[in-house]
Image (cartoon, rainbow, N blue to C red):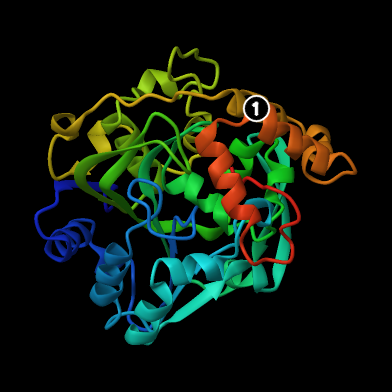
Amino acid sequence: MKLPSVYVKSIDDIQKNLSEGLSFIEWTKIITPGSTVFIKPNLTWTEYTPGVTTSPDLIRCLISIIKDRAGRIIVGESDGGNHAFTADDAFRGHGLDRICREQGIELVNLSRLPSVEIEEEVLGKRVRVVLPKMLVDEVDCFISVPVLKVHAMTGVSLSIKNLWGCYSDPMRCLHHKHLDYKLALIARKVNPRIVVIDGKYALDNHGPMFGTPTDMNLLICSDNPVLADVTGAEIMGMHPSEFSRFGLGGVRPTRLSHISVAIEAGLGQTESGGIRRNCDWKEFVKHFVVRRTLMDRLCMFTFNSEFVSRIVFKSVLTKSIFALSDKFIRNQTELQMATSCRNKPNSENEHPRSSK
């Protein structure tokens, strides 16, 4: 039986390193000739931003390696949360429209595809998600291509958190309650079989949309999302003892509970005795932190309550709440991002928004 594998490498030539990493996890046993492959980058902003969004060069290299074996390749992302921006804006800003056109592959806005509601139990908790039918019914191999970064709400944003962008409703900000279990359900349904983590630049101090870009110059490849995320978290100084949903943190307060749930739900293996590694990841470790702003702390209420979320994002009070947030709560960076979203030529943007 094939052991779960993870490859970590300092980048000297991205095409060569990616090819080596994919070979190490034996990608040709995962992607069969003629199969349908879906590539999900992390496009949390409208243009390439180091440490925030997936590098277009990495996507280009990935496509070039697998395209002669796969029968159909699709790259896709959903609209920014709360209609902050469209996936099409992000595609253009990252040059993915040109890359996909040159490579002759499909580029899709997941928010515009027919969707299906899925409701199931995860560790005894019944949760519901909305996913594009294509991801559930047509894809043979799902590839998650996240960035190595921290996240103000979930601790880290790696391959499993990247799956939240598959929730095709742009108003997914209303459905963060029980996010850990919903992410596990999405992972169960789309079944990421290859993970490529873009660690050229990692994001420290905040995340997912701003923070301190850190030149890590790393590439991580794995054939399992839990193994990939545990490795990525460890490299950022988030230790296994912090994976407990009941643990406490200091400057890293968010406990990585979605990884804990994924482990408990049987979505991957973390025991070192049953894992193939190309090297000792400890040589790459740096100690990242999550520094929450006042806005982040208030957003925790919307993360944990659908009632509060609806008041904030979809009620007669919404415009007033956003105006007050702009005036008294958002820091300068948060205000600039909210203003940028508001000023985009999108008819749905009636007030400053956040895609957090």
Q: Amino acid at mark 1?
A: Ile
Q: Residue at x 32, y 59 (%)?
A: 55
Residue 300 in view of the camera: no
Name the spot of residue 112 as percent of width and height, x first: 66, 72
| Label 1 secondary element | helix
Dividing the image into 4 quarters, which one contains the C terminus?
top right
Q: Is residue 132 left or right of residue 318?
A: left
Name the spot of residue 149 as percent of width and height, x first: 38, 39
Total tally of numbered discs in the picture: 1
Q: Is residue 324 left or right of residue 197?
A: right
Q: Is 339 in front, or is 132?
A: 339
Q: Which residue is mark 1?
A: 329
Q: Quadrant of residue 102?
A: bottom left
Residue 197 vertical position relative to residue 100 in the rendered view, above or below: above
Q: Quadrant of residue 174?
A: top right
Q: Is residue 177 left or right of residue 251?
A: right
Name the spot of residue 211 as percent of width and height, x first: 40, 36
**Badge 1: few (under 14), some or many (20 or more) residues near its Cα, within 10 Å?**
some
Q: Is 185 in front, or is 76?
A: 76
Residue 92 vertical position relative to residue 304 in the rendered view, above or below: below
Q: Is residue 353 left or right of residue 28?
A: right
Name the spot of residue 228 as percent of width and height, x first: 33, 44
Q: Residue at x 61, y 23 (%)?
A: 297
Residue 48 vertical position relative to residue 229 in the rendered view, above or below: below
Residue lying farthest to the right in this orientation: 316
Residue 196 in view of the camera: yes
Q: Is 290 in front, or is 142?
A: 290
Residue lying farthest to the front in this orientation: 327
